[in-house]
Amino acid sequence: MKHSLRIDRIAEGKSDYMPLLLVGDESAEMIGRYIDIGALYVGFVGDAAVAVCMTVELDEDTVEVKNLAVREDYRRMSIGRRMLGYIEKINAGKTIMLGTGESPSNLRFYAACGYHYSHRVADFFTDNYPEPIVEEGIVLKDMIYLSKKQSPAQKKL
């Protein structure tokens, strides 16, 4: 079922969305490193916040998705894909970077959205998180960075 999704940029009260941000990044300390400098986009179905996407501009040509999360009861409804598509449209002509763990479903999702392997940061999760993060039975160790170059023609909102 496709829900009507409204995406708003949130400038004030970003920490109000911490429960959803923690779905995409399990460490409040890590979120604290980018929440103040990042742009937060929240997806709403009716009045309910069901998804978040936090981006940070790395330079004039590159935007990094730091956090993309969808509430569990709204997953597998294309909301994550629609959130990512929105970020791509508002950043037409730029390269979108994102980091993820090695869980097969995450890598499949991003590949299906047109993202390609860029590079790997060895031991990122083991060095930066106090507790092991396990996804799909895999203990996350390295951060896998993926990227996608947006063409300027994609900016059609």
Image (cartoon, rainbow, N blue to C red):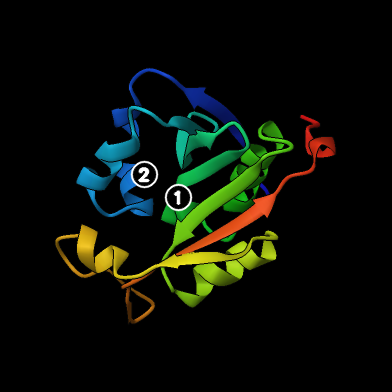
Query: Where does label 2 land, which residue?
Result: 20
The residue located at (67%, 31%) in the rendering is 90
Q: Image height check: is 6 above or below 62?
A: above
Q: Which residue is mark 1?
A: 69
Q: Residues within 10 Å of mark 1 (few under 14, many from 20)?
A: many
Observer-nearest of 70 and 40: 40
Quarter of the image that includes the N terminus: bottom right
Three-letter residue code for mark 2: Leu
Task: Locate the C terminus and report the quarter of the image it occupies.
Answer: top right
Q: Position of residue 81 (x, y in %)?
A: 63, 52
| Residue 5: quarter of image | top right
Q: Is residue 77 visible?
A: no
For the residues labelled 2 and 1, say whether their Cβ atoms are less than 8 Å apart: yes
Tell me the element at label 1.
strand
The residue depicted at 29 percent of the width and 42 percent of the height is: 31
Kindly identify the residue that appears in the image at 38 percent across and 52 percent down: 24
